[in-house]
Image (cartoon, helix red, strand yellow):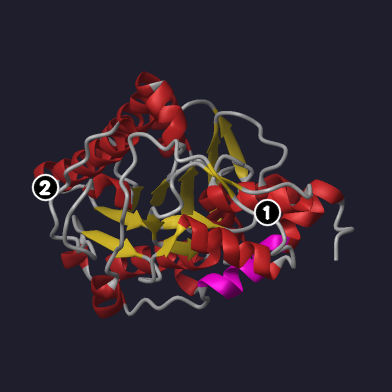
Amino acid sequence: MAFWTDRNVLVTGCTGLLGSCITEALVQADANVVGLVRDRVPRSHLIRSNAVDSISIVSGKIEDYHLVERCLNEYQIQTVFHLAAQTIVGIANQNPLSTFESNVRGTWNLLEACRTTSWVEQIVVASSDKAYGEHQELPYSEDNPLLAKHPYDVSKACADMVAHMYAESYQLPVCVTRFGNLFGSGDSNFDRLIPGTIRSVIRGESPIIRSDGKFSRDYIYIEDAASAYMTLVEGMSKDPTIIGQAFNFSYESPLSALEVVNIVLSQMGRTDLEPQILNAAHNEIPHQYLSSQKARNILNWQPNFSFETGLKRTIPWYKELLEGGTQG
């Protein structure tokens, strides 16, 4: 952890699910953290855990180039975690332009600002497994082409390619991450399957599955995702040859939406609640599954949790959030 002591780190999207967890880990590692915050989100884990009191806050949008440039220079940022994004598929389908503004314009703004400063040593840009689009052969490896077709998927594929362009054309020290679905304490987006299911159980309601229940995804607990980001940056500092590369991270154990809901119901002791399957998902890829072999081999990364153990650590946070922890 000595690598992070007194290191000046910028986390864009620091109030989000992943941003909160990474920020908290960086604070514990004695880094000097600067968070770029667009909106105050009272339910954010960063705020509820009081970790926000230990960092510097820059208020504004990632689309504001001059704000980003000022932030990088005034705080002499050495490491950047670029996590700020519009992350909800349904919102992207409804409003693609705002998603492109945040996810694509925001990425080139940040990287261009990094290009003009002499401080930055490592940049990690969050892409997504959705950037791969739909492939017949699974799991995806980092060599698979990006075949995104739908709004959210395209926004992440564009950000991914912009990051690679800056690494290749300008030798900017960038790496890209592609994760499966993140879950854990701090996710207040109840349109997502796991938070929505937990909330339904707490309310004594049938969980909602927007798809036909058969769509399958990788999942990864948020603390494993945060450690992956920090491991990647440490790897970049030791081995410059990995700069410009992409890395997949997941548990490599895809689950269908119905399987996920049933595991939540079992852990919460409410198998009597019958899931309501809407079969109404649009512009979504039916099956996705990542290989993390490259991260294991090059970064020596291994997860510390399983899906089930991560879920056991997650459920109490929602009980505290939604009902004051009164449910057993």
Q: Would you say 224 lies left or right of 172 here?
A: right
Q: Which residues are magenta?
A: 307-315
Few, some or many residues within 10 Å of mark 2 (<14, 14–19, 20+):
some
> Does the stretch in magenta take in 273?
no
Residue 156 is situated, as x and y percent measured from the top left of the image, at: 30, 40
Up-down relation of residue 9 to residue 61 (above or below): below
Q: Which residue is mark 2?
A: 168
Q: Is residue 65 visible?
A: no
Q: CA distance from mark 2 to mark 1?
A: 43 Å
Few, some or many residues within 10 Å of mark 1 (<14, 14–19, 20+):
many
Nearer to me, 259 or 67: 259
Judged from the image, the secondary structure of the residue bearing numbered disc 1 is helix
Q: Quadrant of residue 245?
A: bottom left
Most frequent secondary structure within the magenta stretch: helix
Q: Quadrant of residue 282?
A: top left
The residue under label 2 is which amino acid type? Glu
Residue 298 is situated, as x and y percent measured from the top left of the image, at: 24, 76
* Mark closer to the chain start, 2 or 1: 2
Residue 82 is situated, as x and y percent measured from the top left of the image, at: 40, 44
- Front position among marks 2 and 1: 1
Q: Quadrant of the C terminus?
A: bottom right
Residue at image location 52% in from the left, 70% down from the top = 307
Q: Which residue is mark 1?
A: 198
Up-down relation of residue 97 to residue 321 (above or below): above
Residue found at the very far right of the displayed protein: 326
Q: Would you say 326 lies left or right of 81 here?
A: right
The residue under label 1 is which amino acid type? Ile
Q: Quadrant of residue 250?
A: bottom left
Residue at image location 29% in from the left, 70% down from the top = 292
Q: Would you say 146 lies left or right of 123 here?
A: left
